[in-house]
Amino acid sequence: MNANLPWWKERTFYQIYPRSFQDSNGDGIGDLRGVLSRLDYLQWLGVGAVWLCPVYDSPNADMGYDIRDYEKIMEEFGSMEDFELLLSELHRRDIKLVMDLVVNHTSEEHPWFVESRSSRDSHYRDYYIWRDGRDGREPNDWASYFTPSAWTYAPATEQWYLHLFSEQQPDLNWENEEVREHVYGMMNRWLDKGVDGFRMDVISHLAKAPGLPDGGNGSGYIFCPERFSFQPRLHDYLREMRRRCFTGRDCMCVGETAFVTTETANSVVGDGQELDLLFQFELMDLDGAETKWDVRPFDLSRFRTVIDAWQKAIDWNTLFWGNHDQPRIVSRFGSTATEEERTASAKMLATALYLLRGTPFIYQGEEIGMTNAPFTEESQLRDVESLNLLKEARRTGREAWAWRGIEAKGRDHSRTPMQWDGTANAGFTSAESWIMVNPNYREINVERAKRDPDSILHYYRALIALRGRTEALLRGDFTLLLPDHPQLFAYRRSWEGQDVVVLCNFSSTPAEIPAALRGRVLLSNQGTVDGALEPYGAVVTALVSKG
Ligand code: NOJ
């Protein structure tokens, strides 16, 4: 008898970015009632859990990742009653709900920070990280994700505060026990409401290097993740959090562990006392160089190396091609050269990733092959990261470079509205939407995809179902096949004598299937499979046992 897998290993997750999912009240902004109206769709797709991006009260400097009140729903998104209804309707459909937890930082408008910045003597001063300057400059040389320096000066109290993200997102001081108590209390209240867990935003950054030492050698600001990732104290916090919040509950947590490596991963997921799952970003870094904006082409052998290393490094991976911080995968690693290639490559990419050992996380719109948006002007952008990049690039004369980066990788690509149908605004809203709708919505939308049995959408549904009913795909060991093949990515999943082989052609030319890997076809994105994979073809086969 096979022991049951925990639900968060068995189910397929679907990530919702509520601002862009479905507007219900005609203000151009997605909301909770909008999500509620689409639950039948999620159920039809076969989704077993939802990760809901932040829905908390926020001034939206970073679209909800700057929280003003952890226990209030953002007004544009609705009310706590709407939230509770959504939760119960999800549960009625046997879909779990995982919330975003953003506790590395708050909004600068959070009452703690408002108090903290008001006086050096404030009780809340120590809730954040305040330091004196050095010779009139920042306390150290750290760069932030979104701004040249990770420090902002507050003239009223003549000190600097740390922010690893925008200056509107001051970092909390996790050394302060009261801060931790507040966070655990808040988490427990959400769990008591019935939510099924948390996706933990940049959780690897909670602890900073003691003494906040410089990252470089004095030659300017330096982005130095080694100073604020995987510090020893991180493990104390995560263990404490788990003990205080998760004991006796059937919930899960997945950490956004920025800068995790195959060496550090097991320090947080190894013994089950910290995180259940982690997001690692090596696949997302495949097309970056010195910075993410220095775009380089996809390389199959690097992709294969990363997958193989991670499948071996930890027992259970998260499998994702996108999220609200990434461009659209079909534009990124697939092909949008023709409609045929978009369809084939979107299905192929899903096959390559979601049948690995791990839990799939599908990002909204991916299942219909939504593409990057044709942004050409700053006025179309909404994301603080892209806007700050442009501002800085203009100052240093690198605007063309910045635009190339934004066109390829700006976060707004994944934030354009979900394309539901071919009516005005893609059926997302009856008003002008908060960010432009991708003009290709008349061709690429859910309604059309539902009508076409060969659509990407139907393929995703079949893929999710296949994974769910195939023991080898759920539980099996992973073995990389054809490690040097120039076109094919191939692997085997094996469980109790059952072998399933996944073969994916990452190229735009046909590829022969080695005879030993031909078997009974379980799923394929091409009509017939006789010995060869078409451009961007994919096939999943059950190997017929010899003897
Ligand atoms: C990661 C989130 O996914 C991203 O959207 C956000 O900007 C940063 N963390 C800061 O919270």
Image (cartoon, rainbow, N blue to C red):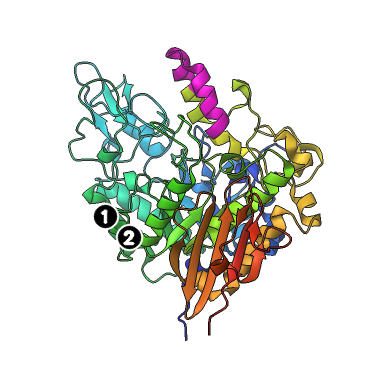
The residue tagged 2 is 274
- Residue 456 to residue 502: above or below: above
In the displayed structure, 163 sits above or below 173; it is above
**Magenta-colored span:** 390-410
On screen, residue 4 above or below 174:
below
Mark closest to the chain's N terminus, 2 or 1: 1
**Mark 1 residue CB less than 8 A from any atom of ligand 1:** no
Tag 2 secondary structure: loop
Q: Residues within 10 Å of mark 2 (few under 14, many from 20)?
A: many
Residue 536 in view, yes or no: yes
The amino acid type found where label 2 is placed reads: Glu
Q: Are discs 2 and 1 less than 8 Å apart at CB?
A: yes
User: Circle 1 is placed at which residue position?
Assistant: 235
The picture places residue 217, in percent across and down from the top left corner, at 20, 25
The one of 345 and 385 positioned closer to us in this rendering: 345
Q: Quadrant of residue 537?
A: bottom right
Q: Residue at x 22, y 40 (%)?
A: 209
Image coordinates for residue 164, horizontal then vertical, percent: 35, 34
Q: Which mark is residue 53?
A: none
Q: Specify the amino acid type for callout 1.
A: His
Q: Nearer the viewer, residue 110 or 525?
A: 525
Label 2, label 1: how far apart the Cα atoms are: 7 Å
Decide if residue 41 is on the left or right side of residue 233: right
Q: On the picture, is 506 further left or further right than 428?
A: left
Q: Quadrant of residue 312?
A: bottom left
Assess whether residue 1 is covered by the magenta stretch.
no
